[in-house]
Amino acid sequence: MIKNNQNNKVNPIPYFLICLITSILLDLLLTNHILHDIFISTTKSNIIDITYVQNTGAAFSSFQHSTLFLIVISVVAVIAIIFELFKDLYKYSFSMHFASAMLVAGILCNTWERVHLGYVRDFINLKFVEFPVFNISDILINLGVLAIIFLIITKKYKRNV
């Protein structure tokens, strides 16, 4: 019981920020490495391929050429997630903070590309299944959402009191 009481007093903001910054750096650095270093020397495989696509829309090519709309929606989503997470600072588990940090990082990285480039750089092409080309930010978003769903279903999204 003492361990739980001490754990509940730990401020989750530094943990969230470390997870967020690490995820953003991983996304941006890995994306640049893949697109600038690996893409040039890539050999084709039957499993995964690097296929560069400039995506001006969202998932599954929806909302093509709606960059401003997607930026606004992304900013609103990030604000809503952070507001919910921190309105009761000690309510959510560290797992929920980690999953939320992945989700926010993916949204922010896609948004940064939309603002900076006018499109999102998609490049991961799964050859063994018919699926749209995607990027690391999309992986972070999907893992974050799936982890949040799992935490809610298993009722592990709140801290033990």
Image (spheres, rainbow, N blue to C red):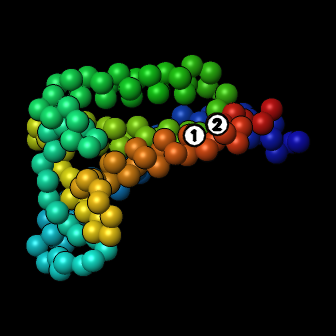
Look at 20% across and 67% down and name the residue there.
50
Q: Tell me whether the residue at label 2 lies in contact with that at label 1, contact meaning CB atoms closer than 8 angstroms.
A: yes
From this view, report whether residue 36 is shown above or below residue 26: below
Q: Residue at x 35, y 22 (%)?
A: 76
Quadrant showing the C terminus? top right
Residue 100 at x, y percent in the picture: 50, 38
The residue lying toward the viewer, choosing from 26 and 155, is 155
Q: How many marks?
A: 2
Where does the image place residue 110, in percent across and percent down from the top left? 26, 41
The picture quadrant where one finds residue 87 is: top right
Q: Decide if residue 115 is in sight here.
A: no
The amino acid type found where label 2 is placed reads Ile
Q: Residues within 10 Å of mark 2 (few under 14, many from 20)?
A: few
- The reply, left or right, for residue 63 in relation to residue 18 is left
108 or 130: nearer the eye? 130
Identity, as a three-letter code, of the amino acid under mark 1:
Ile
For disc 2, the marked residue is 152
- On the picture, is 18 further left or further right than 122? right
Q: Position of residue 95 (x, y in %)?
A: 61, 44
What residue is shown at x 14% (from left), y 39% (from top)? 56
Residue 73 makes an appearance in the image: yes
Residue 8 appears left or right of 19: right
Q: Check disc 2 and report its element: helix, strand or loop.
A: helix
Mark number, residue 149: 1
Relative to 45, is 111 above or below?
Answer: above
The residue at 56%/40% (across/down) is 148
Q: Secondary structure at mark 1?
A: helix
What is the crowding at mark 1: few (fewer than 14 residues within 10 Å), some, or many (at least 20)?
some
